[in-house]
Amino acid sequence: MSDNTFTLYYFQASYYSQKAVLALFEKGCPFNRKIINIQNGEQRTPEYMKMNPQGLVPLLKDGEKIVVESEKIIDYVDGQVKSEKMQKNIASLEEDAQKYPDLHDSYIAKYQKTKKFYEDTINKENVIEHLEDTEHRCEYLEECLRRSKESSAGKEYWLTGTQFNAADILLAVFMDRIVLLGLEDRYFCKTKRPLLYDYLQRIGQRKSVQMLRADVKTAFTMIMWNAAKASVPYVVVIGLAIGAGVWLMKNKSRVIDAFVEK
């Protein structure tokens, strides 16, 4: 965050406090620390009980706003960081519109789309609506696969027939994004939509899809490298990049590799 508005009331040895601290560290948010020694009962002092009547730690203050419970704190911090980044993005587009008069209309159009996207993503009702819409779309796709399978006469089948075509390209990328978001169990698990589940396994055997997934992996490395360069002195970047590479191979690759393994 650009301004140090966060104050975290926590106890270092507390399991729940550690989750909140890790979220702040992970997001690069500076924060004021207020240690509440729960072993000495400091969570039951009148001052603290006024902020959190349950007398639990951790507690996050952002100006006058108070957020309690580690999970809610994590969600709040994540939302605030995304909000700030989006606001900077919008402000940058406005500046570019003034800086480049010949591209003014293009930048304004991009600004309006970006602003609408931001407003949609912070609106809980819109998010729920999109999740439910995806549910309906997946149900329709499952039905399309069922019809395709029935008409294939035992041959290999894809979304619209026995040939892998443009429709399958769109569906393959869509499904990979769902897996990357960790929502595959919601939309096409084996027991809920078996044909979509089977489809995911089969596209993972295609050379073109494997090549695409390998290319996607490189994006993670690039993102981490750029983030490292922007946040630490260059002399430290090399060491971090090596460590990040090891971490990426052990962790991030599992996300993409899950496309093939599942």
Image (tube, helix red, strand yellow):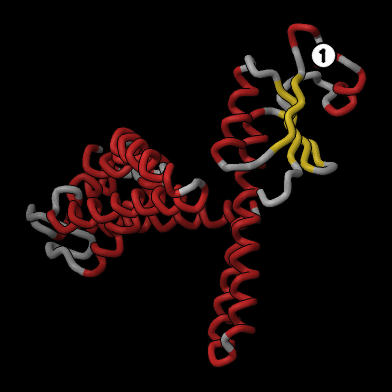
Q: Residues within 10 Å of mark 1 (few under 14, many from 20)?
A: some
Q: Which residue is mark 1?
A: 42
In the figure, is residue 248 to the left or right of 119?
left
In this rendering, the answer to whether 232 lies above or below 49 is: below
The residue depicted at 73 percent of the width and 44 percent of the height is 4
Most foreground residue, 150 or 68: 68
Taking the view exactly as shown, the residue that stands out farthest to the top is 40
Taking the view exactly as shown, the residue that stands out farthest to the right is 46
In this rendering, the answer to whether 41 lies above or below 135 is: above
The residue depicted at 58 percent of the width and 54 percent of the height is 127
Residue type (three-letter) at the residue carrying disc 1 = Glu
* Residue 151 visible, this angle: yes
Name the quarter where the C terminus is drawn: top left
x and y percentages locating residue 140 in the rendered image: 36, 58
The residue depicted at 36 percent of the width and 49 percent of the height is 220
Q: Secondary structure at mark 1?
A: helix
In this rendering, the answer to whether 67 lies above or below 93 is: above
x and y percentages locating residue 19 in the rendered image: 59, 27
